[in-house]
Amino acid sequence: MARILVVEDSSAFRAFIRAALEDAPGLFAASPDDTHGEVEVVEAASGFDALRLLPRGHYDLVITDINMPDINGLELLRFMRDSERHRKVATIIISTQSSEKDRARGLALGADAFLAKPFTVEALQRSITSILQARNSLPAESSEGSR
């Protein structure tokens, strides 16, 4: 089962992302024959909440907004990349500001993808599929170090 942490201060947008993740059979399948690909979505309303949740378990993916009232998504990503435990967790940065500067900063900090709001369910699912395919093609020793 894949565990995903969604960090977004808008409850409506968190619900949108949750629905997109839970309504995608096979998106997180362990193999091509597995059409279930169950997912557990954990929600955080702020970067501070995410910092409290991260140590409580393993996450396969973190989707975080950049613009939040306390700790922003870029600061959260910096924390994750500086942490031995969370360094290799896949991340998607989302933002209403689709500035090239925010995109470049997020990718430079190690985000796997950047999505500008509003985005479609299909765009989110394509990003996740692309990240998972890229990570599954890495040699085993590259991905096991973070588990």
Image (spheres, rainbow, N blue to C red):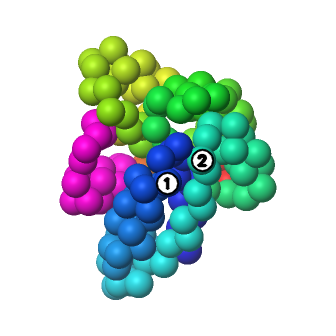
User: In 3D space, how far apart are the residues under numbered discs 2 and 1 (Cα atoms)?
Assistant: 7 Å
Tell me which amino acid carries mark 2.
Ala
Q: Is residue 18 above or below residue 96?
A: below
Where does residue 92 sit, x and y in percent of width and height? 42, 42
Asked if the stretch drawn in magenta spans residue 117, the answer is yes
- For image coordinates 72% across by 51% down, the residue present is 53
The mark nearer the N terminus, 2 or 1, is: 1
Q: Badges 2 and 1: C-beta atoms under 8 Å apart?
A: yes
Q: Residues within 10 Å of mark 1 (few under 14, many from 20)?
A: few
- Circle 1 residue: 11
Residue 53 sits above or below residue 108 on the image? below
Q: How many marks?
A: 2
Relative side of 52 to 106, left or right: right
Q: Which residue is mark 2?
A: 45
Q: Does the magenta run of residues contain 64?
A: no
- Out of 96 and 132, give the one closest to the viewer: 96
Q: Quadrant of residue 99?
A: top left
Tell me what residue is drawn at x 24 percent, y 47 percent: 119
Check disc 2: other Cα within 10 Å, few if <14, some if 14-19, many if 20+.
some
**Nearer the observer, 52 or 79:** 52
In the image, residue 21 above or below residue 7: below
Which of the two residues, 62 or 84, is positioned nearer the viewer here? 62
In magenta, the rendered stretch is 114-134
Helix, strand or loop for the magenta stretch, by majority: helix
**Type of the residue with mark 1:** Ser
